[in-house]
Amino acid sequence: MALIAVASAKGAPGVSTAALAIAAVWPRRSLLAEVDEAGGDLVYRHAADTGQPLDPRIGMLSLALAGRRGLPPALVWEHAQRLNGGQEALLGLASPEQATAWQGTWPLLGRALAALGDADVIADMGRIGPRSGPAEMLPMASLILLISGTTAEEIAALRERIAALAARLSPNGAAGPPIAVLLVGPKREHVKVAAGVNQLLLRQQLPASVITCLPLDALGAAQLAGRKGGRVEKSELMRAARHAVANIAGRYRLGIPDRPQHVQEVRS
């Protein structure tokens, strides 16, 4: 199946929220993988499908220890947990120091996640830079989805990161994973900013384009993170996430539904 790498170029303006929202409306079975080397948040924000707390001992760290002698894709499922509401997840590291457990083996993780035969993987990578461990997984991705804010500084950082990724992943003109952009900003600016960013990328011959924009929906983000109650599937955030998934399917032939599309309810 497919590995969708969700990351940011500068800071992490909604990377975790975007990854969770996309996984929740993904039309096929999906695994949300918190591979950010800075650590994950799901264990603090969500309960297990049993209603009990998630087990902080099971996730990225336990997988690293179990995979020292090999990392077959099936091993990943042994270290995944199901969130209350149904979403399957590979919980992130507890601290940046634990990322040393994956030193030198990030590509093995990338190959394992890309080879899961019964689910697509939405990987929350947080911020990626030239020395980022999770960035070593990018060659195995079916799509790199870069999350960016809409300020001039954030767009400049986005442009530089796309250029660096293109040079790194497509040496000598070889085809690398496609790169898409998901902007996060005020809804009233979406059309204008998306058009401006697409023009900038085209003018500088950078191999990426904006697929859609996510609104600054504080209530929807809080509902999705389990901090607020209410019907998150009705929020502006989730409507935009469904639009993003539809565009991904249309442009990249990923996430083509093999069952009716739905929102996996994610509760705290």
Image: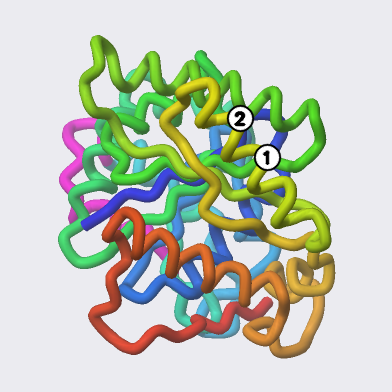
Residue for badge 2? 200
Q: How many marks?
A: 2
Q: Which residues are magenta?
A: 67-81
What SS does tag 2 mark?
helix
Tell me if residue 126 can be seen: no
Q: How is the image coloured?
A: rainbow
The residue beneath circle 1 is 196
Residue at the (74%, 62%) spot, across then down: 215
| Magenta stretch: includes residue 215 | no
Nearest to the observer: residue 247 or residue 225: 247
Query: How far from the left and from the top, in percent, is residue 18?
Result: 60, 57
> At 50% across and 42% down in the image, what residue appears?
209
Nearer to me, 97 or 169: 169
In the displayed structure, does residue 11 sit left or right of residue 244? right
Query: Disc 2, disc 1: CB below 8 Å?
Result: yes
179 relative to 124 in the view: left or right: left
Q: Position of residue 132 (x, y in %)?
A: 51, 22
Residue at 42% across, 30% down: 207
Q: What kind of residue is marked 1? A: Gly
